[in-house]
Image (tube, rainbow, N blue to C red):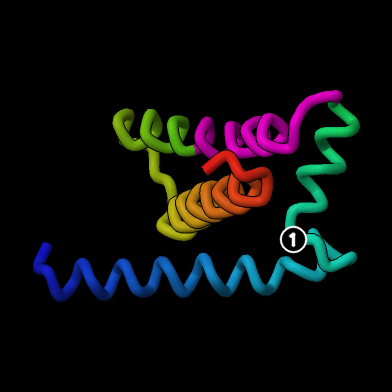
Amino acid sequence: MTTEKFVELFNAQIKSCKDILIDRASVYAPNQDRLENFKQAALLQSCTPVTALGGMLAKHIIAIYSFISSQESNIFVSPEQWKEKITDSINYLILLSALLEESSNV
């Protein structure tokens, strides 16, 4: 892959991440706290918001591993499915960074 193609792919990925985080804000954070869902999940599970996020992130990572296994077995996974899970995983890591920043653990 050329550097130019990689930069194009990188920029498209970052735009996708940003668009989704912005689009989903009103659904996942209606009260202006972008991290509210993780705090609510933490209360329900008697854990920290970081631990709650970790559980939610695990779902996406497990799906990626499943996609990898499928690919290794020559089972088709659509580009859209790959992009969705990769984008979700990146976004959860960004949200993790925000949780850690908010709690001053970075």
In this view, the residue in front, 83 or 78, is: 83
In percent of width and height, residue 2 lies at 9, 68
- At 46% from the left and 38% from the top, the residue drawn is 64
- Indicate left or right for 41 with 104 as reference: right
Q: Does the magenta stretch include residue 1?
A: no
Query: What residue sits 81% from the left and 34% below the top?
Result: 42
Going by the numbered disc 1, the residue's amino acid type is Arg
Crowding near the residue tagged with mark 1, few <14, some 14–19, many ≥20 C-alpha atoms within 10 Å: some
Q: Is residue 43 left or right of residue 17?
A: right
Residue at left offset 89%, top offset 65%: 31
Residue labelled with disc 1? 34
Q: Is the magenta stretch mostly helix, strand or loop?
A: helix
Residue extending furthest toward the left: 2
* Picture quarter with the N terminus: bottom left
Q: Quadrant of residue 105?
A: top right
Please say if 75 is above or below 88.
above
x and y, in percent, of residue 73 in the image: 32, 29
Please say if 50 is above or below 37. Answer: above
Q: What element carries label 1?
A: loop
Q: Where is residue 35 in the image (x, y as percent from the top left)?
A: 74, 53
Toward the front, the furthest residue is 104
- Residue at figure coordinates x 60%, y 38% from the top left: 57
- Residue 36: % across, % down: 81, 52
Tag count: 1
Q: Give the range drawn in magenta.
A: 46-63
Q: In which quarter of the image is residue 67?
A: top left
